[in-house]
Image: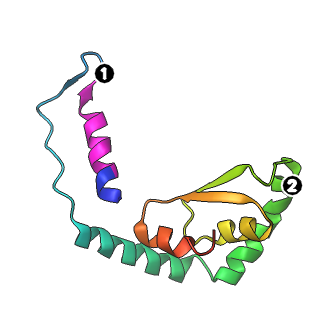
Amino acid sequence: DVSQAKRFIYQIRNQDPALGQSRPNLTPLPAANPAADAQLDDFYSAFEDEFRGSRAAINQRLQKYMPLIADANLSRHAKILDVGCGRGEWLEILRDAGYDRSDSTSTMRCSSNAAPRG
């Protein structure tokens, strides 16, 4: 969840590394706003659909990286992590090639879009 990640980052940044104590002069983050998070997810999804290219075009572009995966001599059971998986095209290619894979993305919409593909 994006809101939880933001709060966690705030907590880390709010620690004085030398003393391990909180710095009281920082303004706390506002409470989580699921509606705003969903709105941002919707915007990003529409932006990606408009400017990234079609799924077919992205799949074609990503195929050129498969020889690198083959050259790595990975076991089919080795986990391949796609950080920022977007719509999941790379996860889909890896799945179709028989590799085990997982994703990490910052938006719930992207994660739910990628899940069926990877």
Image location (x, y in percent) of residue 38: 32, 73
Residue 92, picture quadrant: bottom right
Disc 1 secondary structure class: loop
Q: Which stretch is magenta?
A: 5-16
Q: Report which residue position mark 2 lands on.
A: 70
Kindly report the secondary structure that dominates the magenta region of the rendered protein.
helix
Distance of mark 1 from mark 2, alpha carbons? 43 Å
| Number of residues whose C-alpha sits closer than 10 Å to that of mark 2, classed few (under 14), some (14–19) or many (20 or more) | few
Where disc 2 sits, the SS reads helix
Residue 29 picture location, percent across and down: 18, 49
Mark 1 nearby-residue class (10 Å; few <14, some 14–19, many ≥20): few
User: Which quarter of the figure has residue 34?
Assistant: bottom left
Q: Which residue is mark 1?
A: 17
Left or right, 32 with reference to 108: left
Task: Pick whichever, 77 or 32, lies toward us.
Answer: 77
Q: What residue type is disc 1 on?
A: Pro
Magenta stretch: includes residue 26:
no
